Image: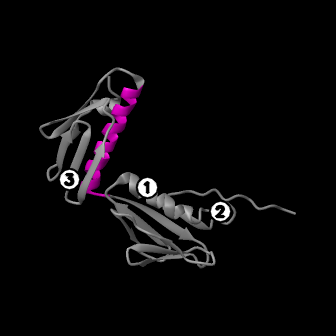
Amino acid sequence: MLSRIAKLPINIPSGVEVSVNGSHVKVKGPLGLLEFVFDSIVGIKKEGETIVLSTKDDSKFAKAMSGTVSAMITNMIEGVTKGFEKKLTILGVGYRANMEGQNLNLTLGYSHPVLVKAPAGIKFATPSQTEVVVSGIDKQLVGQMAAVVRSKRPVEPYKGKGVRYANERVIIKETKKK
């Protein structure tokens, strides 16, 4: 028994090589190589230009894992073909970001600059002093690094100053009245 997502076969686009060895999956494309070892309760088979999933038993856990494996393989294929990116916006007087080599240097109102090092596979870009773009081929790692940058100065709810996602809506609280 599979989840609704896992019942559909995953198409492999041209220019992408997928190799399956048991529960170990390697996806190679124009932007790079991703590999992951999935839970062995989900069977992964490559049939021509598609990937078909199956489960070893009919447990609730197996059904949930089949959907997770399907989504992760789809994200791996999309990552090596198009890549992923998260955009962050910095609001506040004197708050800005700039690049120092591969690393991100943030001025966020502290007495010292905040340096965020880019791990392997992640690129930072600063189109302007108040914008940061985190990009890479691994969706989980891009989201994690965007969250790390945001955590250096989260948005405060009274003035809205801080680092936020580009599409994030912040509800401003009303200040205390006398």
Amino acid type shown at disc 3:
Lys
Residue 92, can we see it? yes
Q: Is residue 47 left or right of residue 72?
A: left
Mark 1–mark 2 distance (CA, rounded to whole Å): 21 Å
Q: Does label 1 or label 2 sit earlier along the sequence?
A: 1
The residue tagged 3 is 28
Relative image position of residue 75 (x, y in whole percent): 31, 47
Residue carrying label 1: 143
Give the amino acid type for the residue marked by disc 1 in the picture: Gly
Secondary structure, mark 3, is strand
Q: Which residue is mark 2?
A: 156
Assign the C terminus to one quadrant of the image. bottom right
Residue 103 x, y percent position in the rendering: 42, 73
Where does the N terminus fall, quadrant-wise?
top left
Q: Residue at x 34, y 54 (%)?
A: 138
Please identify the quarter of the rendering in which residue 68 is found.
Answer: top left
Residue 160 is marked as: none
Question: In front: mark 1 or mark 2?
Answer: 1
Quick check: 149 left or right of 123? right
| Residue shown at 20% from the left, 55% from the top | 29
Let me know if residue 70 is in the magenta part: yes
Query: Dot 3, how many residues are within 10 Å of its Cα: few (below 14), some (14-19), or many (20+)?
Result: some
Residue type at mark 2: give it: Glu
